[in-house]
Image: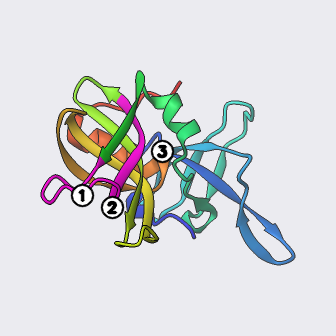
Amino acid sequence: MAIEVNELRIGNYFHPSHTSNGVILPARRIMWQVGSVDIFGAIKVIEPSRPDTIYLSCNECHPISITEEWLRKVSIDVCKYQQEGNGYDYKPGYLTYEGNDYLISENVFIRYSVFRYKDSSGHFIEEDEGFRYFKGTPGAHDLIRAVDSIHQLQNLHHALTGEELQIK
């Protein structure tokens, strides 16, 4: 699935495409950055190892999925997170959240969590996992939204803090 041109900002990371048996696929081992986007949607690529200018169409740019490995590249601290119950009708063992909080800055963190809900016989009836962007601290925060890709995280962080996401 390609990234829409209106989702890209200068500095966003993405996977370029490659073609295999006539099918366009993301080249997951390659990571490039957006240098500029022209009015026709052509993306100029920042590729330090190549001195020539590379232009791609937006349908050749694929999102980089957020992983815990990626979050270690953007966080300044990591702490374990675990909760039972939903805060309203506490039922130990029926509803659990667990994962890690990745502190991005003093008042911003990303939570990777696995949500599990058991029925009265102890069988899991629902599971969900994902990455969610929070403003505040792990003890007192507001959920902003779920994020799936690095360019979404970069854009959201910039929109809410006015700062570029620092990637190590």
Please state which of residues 143 and 42 is positioned toward the viewer in this rendering: 143
- Residue matched to label 1: 91
User: Label 1, label 3: how many angstroms apart (C-alpha)?
Assistant: 42 Å
Whether residue 86 appears in magenta in the rendering, the answer is yes
Q: Residue 166: x percent and y percent?
A: 43, 27
**Which region of the structure is painted magenta?**
84-103
Give the crowd class for mark 3: few <14, some 14-19, many >=20 residues within 10 Å: many
Q: Which residue is mark 2?
A: 94
> What residue do we see at 44% from left, 66% from top?
127
The mark closer to the camera, 3 or 2, is 2
Q: Are marks 1 and 2 in contact (CB under 8 Å)?
A: yes
Q: Earlier in the sequence, mark 1 or mark 3?
A: 3
Alpha-carbon distance for marks 1 and 2?
A: 6 Å
Q: Residue at x 22, y 35 (%)?
A: 161
How crowded pointer 1 is (Cα within 10 Å; few <14, some 14-19, many 20+) is rated as few
SS class, disc 1: loop
* Residue ranking furthest to the right: 21
Is 12 on the left-hand or right-hand side of 94?
right
In-front residue for pair 77/126 = 126
Q: In this picture, is 161 found above or below 92?
A: above
Q: Which residue is mark 3?
A: 12
Residue 156 visible, this angle: no
Q: Position of residue 18 (x, y in %)?
A: 76, 62
Q: Above or below — where is 119 with respect to 39?
A: below
What residue is rendered at 25% in x and 33% in y? 138
- The quadrant of the image that shows the N terminus is bottom right
The image shows residue 162, relative to residue 41, as above or below, that is above
Q: CA distance from mark 3 to mark 2?
A: 40 Å
- Taking depth in this image into account, of 21 and 56 the one nearest to the observer is 21
Residue 118 percent across, percent down from the top left: 39, 67
